[in-house]
Image: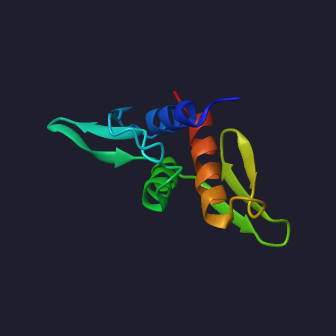
Amino acid sequence: MKTDLELLYAAAKAGGIEVELCTCKDPKWPLKVVSGHGTRGHWSSLSSGADALSLAAKLGLTIQIDLVDDLTRILNDCDGVICVELHGSSGAYPATRRAITRAAATLEP
C-alpha cells in the first residue's frame, strides 16, 4: 500500500502535473507545482477539492457518490472501480478526494 506522499506523486504524474517536495513542512501540503518559471504553489489532491476535481476532469474520471452505501466510487475505462468509504472518520469530502487520488495513481504512466 502506498503512503499518501507516494499516492500524490503518482496522481500528479498521471495528470501530467510536475511537482516537487515542498520545504514548508506543512503535512497538509507536501508538494508544490513546478512550472517553467519556478514553483507555482502548493498541490495536493488529498487536501484541495479544486486540485482533486481538476485531476478527475483531466483524467476523465467519473465520480459517483453513493449515500446509501456510504461510498465514493471512481469509475474509469481502464481499471474498473475504486471505492472509498464516505463517512466513517473522514467524511464525504476527504473520502472523495482520496478516491480521486487513488484512482489517478492507478493510471500513472
Query: Could you tell me which quadrant the N terminus lies in?
Result: top right
Q: Residue furthest right?
A: 69
Q: Position of residue 70 (x, y in %)?
A: 80, 65
In the drawing, does residue 9 fall left or right of residue 65?
A: left
Identify the residue at horizontal 55%, vertical 30% (top origin). 6
Q: Nearer the viewer, residue 11 or 75?
A: 11
Q: Nearer the viewer, residue 60 or 5?
A: 5
Q: Position of residue 109 (x, y in %)?
A: 51, 27
In the drawing, does residue 96 fall left or right of residue 81?
A: left
Q: Nearer the viewer, residue 32 or 24?
A: 24
Here the colouring is rainbow
Q: Residue furthest front?
A: 25
Q: Position of residue 19 (x, y in %)?
A: 36, 34
Identify the residue at horizontal 47%, vertical 48% (top origin). 28
Q: Residue furthest bottom?
A: 68
In the drawing, does residue 109 fall left or right of residue 17?
A: right
Identify the residue at horizontal 41%, vertical 44% (top origin). 26
Q: Position of residue 43 (x, y in %)?
A: 39, 46
Numbered circles on residues, count: 0
In the drawing, does residue 57 fall left or right of residue 86?
A: left
Up/down of 66 relative to 78, above or below: below
